[in-house]
């Protein structure tokens, strides 16, 4: 009987040890499942981060390209502003020259008009002088005769 009680006690201890081992196994299985789940999530996060990093690199490259283009556009714009300013100055100078030439042309037209008037008067005086010469000649002829 004592042997049987001792075996029963040993069996009970083994049963308790088995229950404890099964509980530990269940806890470890739960932890393992959680760790596997965390690993899958970490892998997915890593994939997402890799994709985001690639998108960021692409966007950065695009932004750098645009920035380089902006630098070229600024250079072109500065060059065009300079050309515009030179052309504006040339236009102003041409307009000033045109105004001076127009004033000279008008002055020459007025002077020409005065010369024409003087010429007409000189011609008229010349006709008068010729007429007077003719009369004088006629007087000379009549006084001789």
Image (cartoon, helix red, strand yellow):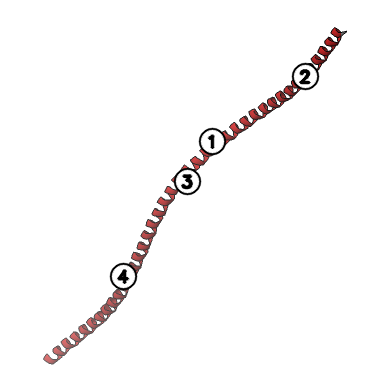
Seen at 37% across and 63% down, the residue is: 92
Q: Nearer the viewer, mark 1 or mark 3?
A: 1
**Residue 139 placement: quadrant:** bottom left
Seen at 25% across and 79% down, the residue is: 123
- Per the image, the residue denoted by label 3 is 70
Q: Viewed as shown, does residue 20 lie left or right of 63?
A: right
| Front one among 122 and 79 | 79
Q: Viewed as shown, does residue 6 lie left or right of 88?
A: right
- Per the image, the residue denoted by label 1 is 57
- Per the image, the residue denoted by label 2 is 22
Give the CA distance from mark 2 to mark 1. Answer: 51 Å
Residue 104: mark:
4
**Residue 38 placement: quadrant:** top right
* Mark 3 nearby-residue class (10 Å; few <14, some 14–19, many ≥20): few
* Mark 1 nearby-residue class (10 Å; few <14, some 14–19, many ≥20): few
Q: Reading the chain from its start, which is encountered first: label 1 or label 3?
A: 1
> Are the residues at dot 3 and dot 2 in contact (C-beta closer than 8 Å)?
no
| Front one among 43 and 20 | 20
């Amino acid at each position: 009987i004592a042997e049987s009680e001792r075996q029963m006690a040993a069996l009970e201890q083994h049963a308790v040890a088995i229950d404890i081992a099964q509980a530990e196994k269940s806890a470890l299985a739960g932890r393992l499942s959680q760790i596997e789940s965390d690993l899958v999530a970490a892998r997915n996060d890593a994939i997402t981060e890799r994709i985001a990093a690639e998108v960021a690199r692409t966007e950065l490259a695009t932004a750098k390209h645009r920035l380089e283009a902006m630098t070229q556009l600024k250079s072109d714009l500065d060059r065009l502003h300079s050309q515009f300013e030179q052309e504006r100055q040339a236009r102003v100078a041409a307009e000033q020259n045109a105004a001076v030439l127009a004033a000279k042309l008008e002055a020459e037209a007025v002077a020409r008009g005065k010369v024409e008037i003087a010429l007409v008067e000189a011609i008229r005086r010349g006709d008068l002088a010729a007429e007077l010469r003719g009369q004088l000649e006629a007087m000379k002829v009549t006084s001789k005769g």
